[in-house]
Amino acid sequence: MKKVKDIIKYYLNSGSFCKLKGSTQKDYEKHLQMAGITPIGNKHLANFYIEDLDVRACQEAYNHWLKTGTRTANYRKAAFSVAWKHAMRHDVIKYDPINLIQSTNNDVRRVRWTNAQVKKFLNLAYSDYRYRSIGLIVHMAYDWAQRVGDMRLLKWDQVDIPNRQVSFVQSKRNAEVHLPIGEGLANMLIQQNDDFGWSGEFVAPRTVLRANKITPYTKLEISPLVNEVLEKADLPSYLTAMDLRRTAITEMLEGGADAVNIMQVSAHKNVASMKPYLVNTLKGATNALSKREVK
């Protein structure tokens, strides 16, 4: 191996890469490709000889990635670092300039939906057949405090409507969760099952057939459709479907739910990982202060 592109190729053809989930493989491959074509001086990063790749060049590449966004830059750095460390573990290279890149922390998003905003969104989505499944994805993500991606791919064989419960494995944490189905959501699932259940697979598929088949939305389709509903419902454009999980978990915390019980819903592995949801709110402060024993 002589160049950075050889390191990337070595990793993409490795057993370690093959063990990753399909979605992670696609993400890593895409970001490693983008890292490789990053311009550094008069050549691309992939064409650097390994011994010539120093911290300065890596930092310049990272700063270039920041133009796309902090989250993207950090993910790209992580993917590049995984490939580089794989080569180090096999004694292909001896040093790691990527580890010395000065990264920018991701800004923690604090946006939350209000209960009124959720209801307004659902009323609009459920009133228009085109947005029925988008409304259901949002409804499930909010009611169950789950990720939109898992709701997008939820299948009917994971839903037990008669016993009012759902069970599935989270894609990110590979954790199995068992959740109750509330009355309002159960009614919508029954209606959805009457309309789409015969397709036999996805709970909230596209409402328009593709190749004469009922298929799930892709990750890239959700956000634009959510934005369409937000606009039609005259709701703030800064709201996103991804904010719903944060909203639900914060509401549980504000309501005084025990952290361990919340972890049964969210599947966080420890209390520390819930820190991003511990936002300061008037309701939360009021609940806390009301529990004081003032003498």
Image: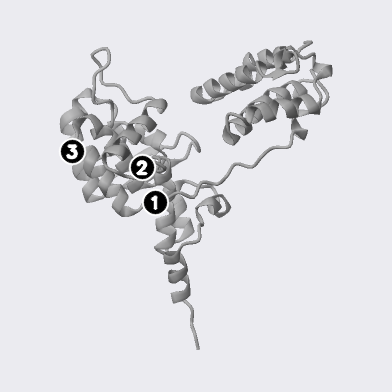
Could you classify mark 3 by the number of other residues whose Cα lies within 10 Å: few (under 14), some (14-19), or many (20 or more)? few
Specify which label sits upstream in the sequence, 2 or 1: 2
Q: Which residue is mark 3?
A: 127
In the depicted view, which residue is nearer to us: 177 or 247? Answer: 247
The residue that appears at 56% across and 49% down in the rendered structure is 273
Image quarter of residue 40: top right
Is 219 left, or right, of 31 in this rendering? left
Is 93 left, or right, of 228 in this rendering? right
Asked whether the beta carbons under mark 3 and mark 1 sit within 8 Å of each other, the answer is: no
The residue that appears at 50% across and 22% down in the rendered structure is 22
Question: Residue 260 in the image: x percent, y percent?
Answer: 48, 56
Q: Which residue is mark 1?
A: 248
Asked whether the beta carbons under mark 2 and mark 1 sit within 8 Å of each other, the answer is: yes
Q: Which residue is mark 2?
A: 141
> Looking at the picture, which amino acid does disc 3 mark?
Ser
Question: Residue 237 in the image: x percent, y percent?
Answer: 38, 41
Could you classify mark 2 by the number of other residues whose Cα lies within 10 Å: few (under 14), some (14-19), or many (20 or more)? many
Specify which label sits upstream in the sequence, 3 or 1: 3
Image quarter of residue 12: top right
Asked whether the beta carbons under mark 2 and mark 3 sit within 8 Å of each other, the answer is: no
Specify which label sits upstream in the sequence, 2 or 3: 3
In the depicted view, which residue is nearer to us: 113 or 266? Answer: 113
In the depicted view, which residue is nearer to us: 79 or 52? Answer: 52
SS of the residue under disc 3: helix
Q: Is residue 205 visible?
A: yes
SS of the residue under disc 1: helix
**Rendered position, 16 above or below 259:** above
Which label sits in the foreground, 3 or 1? 3
Question: Residue 266 in the image: x percent, y percent?
Answer: 44, 47
